[in-house]
């Protein structure tokens, strides 16, 4: 479970139980998707330490349903005593939460939960809800990864239980990271830096985008991390995020000296993400126009990071980023192009890309940074006449100032108040 002990998982489960009870729910169902893609896996993983690597397979009646997914059932009240007579011990999370999966034998470390194997996850989940959660409102977290057909099936066989989408419970539970989580985020950031360095070392004139991507992925895998994804573009295509096909890179186009090469790279260590973006010029020094572009995205992001301290609102941080960008040499020469990210300057980071969103005018603009948060601040620009560039750093909010996990340094000086 990568530095997260059973006691912490038990504490998370108890915290989720309290959150659900406070909102009037009788229990929580966490639903997650696997397949080694790291999309929509966080809710089950956060509560149990489990990740389902089996890929999604379409439903086959009589054989399996929701293959490649996993579910957790967490009642607000104490669950029944296990039928085998093994009563849950005080503080033993495995007795108070059920993980349902179609995986076979599990390797160590085992999930911090009782485990039920089932070929039909939907019917098994319905049966577990009936057995463990009294009729009434049930919080469903991980709503986006539950297919409509499975949702309808659950509703049809659970007339006494009202499944309510409640992803906000999960966001609240994961907002402030524990010391163990912060250590994993630091390790993840360092791995991202190493992977990006490997990509840059490989980016010589004559190699393909695929060669550059392979160097980054190899560095991640060699270190025991998990590759999640990337967007990569270069030269006359650098204003795009990535290739339009299933592979985000070209295996045909070869880099030329003077090309802009832009990479947005994301992966994880024990589930905890890094996300960083860098842009550089292949084989040559940047031109004046390229330098203006590179400086604008980097300096505006770093200005926001310098302001990121407990008590600052995310609207203030976004305004600082925007002000520095508007004063840049790039903006003086090219004006203010339409933002690639629609005014968003970053987001929360942990087991997923998550709230809060760093935006000047929006639902999270008035929220305040707190010590223990991890955020990714970023900016991407695309100008056809010059090219595209992106810059992104991951940062932990601390009482002593922002700690950049993707450069291994703290912000150099306190922000003006």
Image (tube, helix red, strand yellow):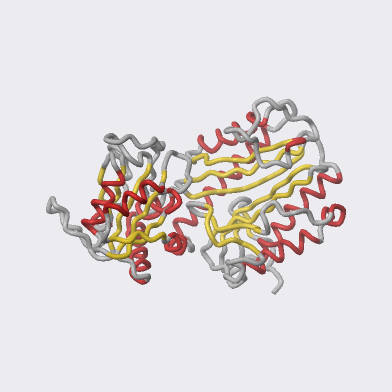
Quadrant housing the C terminus: bottom right
Q: Position of residue 14 (x, y in %)?
A: 33, 64
**Farthest residue toward the bottom?**
417
Q: Is residue 55 above or below residue 83?
A: above
* Residue drawn where x is 72% and y is 30% of the image: 204
In the rendered structure, the answer to whether residue 91 lies left or right of residue 166 reads left
Between 294 and 384, the one lying in front of the other is 384
Residue 175 vs residue 54: left or right?
Answer: right
Instruction: In this rendered view, identify the residue nearer to me: 364 or 157.
Output: 157
Q: Residue at x 35, y 42 (%)?
A: 66
Across and down, in percent, residue 336 comes to: 80, 56
- The percent coordinates of residue 246 (x first, y second) are 57, 33
- Give the percent coordinates (x, y) of residue 311: 59, 73
Question: In which image quadrant can residue 199 be found?
Answer: top right
Give the camera-side residue of 104 and 135.
135
**Number of callouts in the render?**
0
Left or right of 287? Residue 229 is left
Which residue is more in the foreground, 306 or 38? Answer: 38
Residue 223's place in the image compared with 11, above or below, is: above
């Amino acid at each position: 479970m990568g530095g997260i002990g059973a006691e912490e998982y038990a504490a998370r489960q108890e915290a989720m139980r309290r959150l659900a009870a406070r909102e009037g729910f009788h229990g929580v169902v966490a639903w997650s998707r696997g397949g080694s893609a790291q999309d929509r896996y966080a809710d089950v993983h956060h509560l149990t330490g489990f990740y389902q690597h089996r890929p999604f397979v379409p439903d086959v009646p009589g054989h399996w349903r929701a293959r490649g997914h996993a579910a957790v059932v967490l009642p607000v009240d104490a669950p029944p005593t296990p039928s085998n007579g093994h009563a849950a011990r005080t503080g033993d999370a495995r007795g108070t939460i059920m993980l349902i999966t179609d995986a076979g034998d599990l390797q160590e470390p085992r999930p911090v939960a009782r485990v039920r194997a089932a070929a039909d996850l939907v019917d098994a989940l319905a049966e577990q809800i009936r057995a463990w959660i009294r009729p009434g409102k049930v919080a469903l977290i991980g709503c986006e990864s539950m297919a409509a057909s499975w949702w309808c099936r659950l509703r049809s066989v659970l007339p006494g239980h009202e499944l309510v989408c409640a992803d906000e419970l999960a966001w609240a539970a994961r907002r402030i990271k524990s010391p163990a989580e912060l250590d994993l985020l630091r390790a993840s950031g360092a791995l991202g830096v190493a992977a990006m360095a490997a990509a840059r070392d490989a980016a010589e004139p004559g190699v393909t985008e695929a060669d550059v991507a392979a160097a980054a992925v190899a560095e991640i895998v060699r270190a025991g991390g998990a590759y999640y994804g990337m967007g990569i573009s270069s030269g006359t295509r650098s204003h795009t995020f990535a290739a339009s096909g299933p592979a985000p890179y070209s295996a045909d186009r070869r880099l030329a000296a003077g090309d802009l090469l832009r990479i947005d790279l994301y992966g994880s260590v024990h589930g905890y993400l890094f996300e960083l973006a860098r842009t550089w010029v292949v084989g040559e020094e940047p031109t004046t126009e390229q330098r203006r572009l590179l400086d604008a995205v980097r300096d505006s992001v770093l200005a926001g990071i310098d302001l990121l301290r407990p008590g600052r609102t995310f609207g203030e941080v976004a305004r600082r980023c925007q002000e520095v960008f508007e004063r840049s040499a790039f903006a003086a020469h090219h004006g203010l192009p339409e933002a690639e990210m629609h005014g968003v300057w970053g987001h929360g980071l942990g087991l997923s890309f998550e709230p809060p969103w760093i935006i000047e005018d929006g639902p999270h603009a008035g929220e305040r940074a707190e010590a223990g948060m991890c955020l990714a601040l970023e900016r991407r620009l695309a100008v056809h006449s010059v090219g595209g560039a992106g810059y992104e750093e991951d940062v932990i909010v601390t009482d002593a100032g922002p700690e950049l996990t993707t450069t291994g340094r703290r912000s150099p000086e306190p922000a003006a108040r």
